[in-house]
Amino acid sequence: MADISLDTQMGNFKFTNPILNAAGVRDADSTQLNTIINSWAGGVVTKSATMKPREGNPEPRMKGLPHGCINSMGLPNHGIDYYLDYAIKNEGKNNKQVILSIAGLSIDENIQLLKKIQDSDYQGLVEMNLSCPNIDGETQIAYDFDSVEAILNQAFEFFTKPLGIKLPPYLDFYQFDSIAKVLNKYPITYVNAINTIGNGLVVNPETEQTLIKPKGGFGGISGEYIKPTALANVRALRLRLNPEIKIIGTGGIHTGEDVFEHILCGADAVQIGTYFGFDDTPVFEKVTKELLAIMARKGYTSLDDFRGKLKVLD
Ligand code: SIN
């Protein structure tokens, strides 16, 4: 399989493997981040940072399910200074890109975070998470298209570094059309589709209780449950976004076939969250080898051979 290339490009950044970790799983500190860099993952994504360190929501705040997970972590993180320092020191290490994830709790906080990054020596990719569903009392910013426009308007007045946006799952063609219309106005490097499906509820019928404590048991659903929604978002956005805006597909990936399907729908790269949580770094090697085997069987030698080439029934 030596003649198969997994190279992919986002803006000026080349990845030799499109399979990355998703923000929020096993990526909260430098030890965990180094473990990812030293694995088969094609790059490393940091835990979404806020301006100040946060403890996050009360426990239990995450539970594994038969086909995925429910979580309401509430953005526990060490604060932007910690992750920015890590990103500056590790950008390009092992020939891998760092993606610095940020998640301000308001429009203003996102702008402050971007200003800090703009004023720093960091030159790598930034992923602005506008879709965390787990902050009590806050709505997911990217469900409000005017707010997304307000942030991007302000951001691109000063921000000159490569910016990706992590989106929530959209469920309606009106939403696909509306978000694409906003995003197409700006020089965004990529979008990441999707975050968890927010505010699901999982019940234990024996104890008659919710599985997690925060927000009365409501939490983001991930894993296999969300793959069809993730694929739909990747596909719908690829059909609507300017070709310069790349797409990272996230949701339900735990086999090479899942990656293949995301790329067929138009993803340039993918991220693994839930199954990285379950299986740790071996998941990157397993999934990469499975993808290579599928490409070999089909005679594909690069991702371009099938990216976005999903066939629809006549
Ligand atoms: C969390 O920390 O609550 C998860 C992050 C996210 O869903 O964006």
Image (cartoon, grey):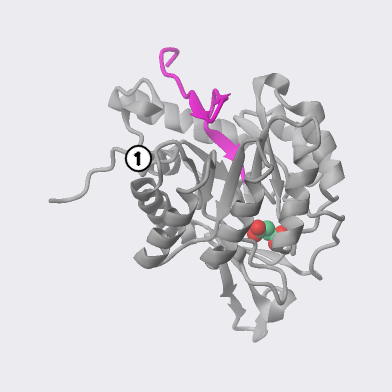
- The percent coordinates of residue 193 (x first, y second) are 50, 51
Taking the spot 54% from the left edge, 23% from the top edge, the residue there is 16
Nearest the viewer among 301 and 148 is 148
For the residue marked with disc 1, what is the amino acid?
A: Leu
Nearest the viewer among 206 and 297 is 297
Taking the spot 36% from the left edge, 34% from the top edge, the residue there is 307
Question: Can residue 2 be found in the magenta stretch?
Answer: yes
Would residue 141 be found to the left or right of residue 171 on screen?
A: right
Find residue 57 and report its image quarter.
bottom right
For the magenta stretch, what is the residue range? 1-22
Q: Answer yes or no: is residue 189 visible.
A: yes
Would residue 235 be found to the left or right of residue 92 on screen?
A: left
Nearest the viewer among 65 and 248 is 248
Would residue 302 be found to the left or right of residue 75 on screen?
A: left
Taking the spot 65% from the left edge, 36% from the top edge, the residue there is 160
* Residue on which disc 1 sits: 264
Q: Find numbered disc 1 in the image and state the secondary structure of the residue it sits on.
A: helix
- The percent coordinates of residue 77 (x first, y second) are 81, 53
Point out the residue furthest to the top here: 2
Find residue 293 and report its image quarter.
top left
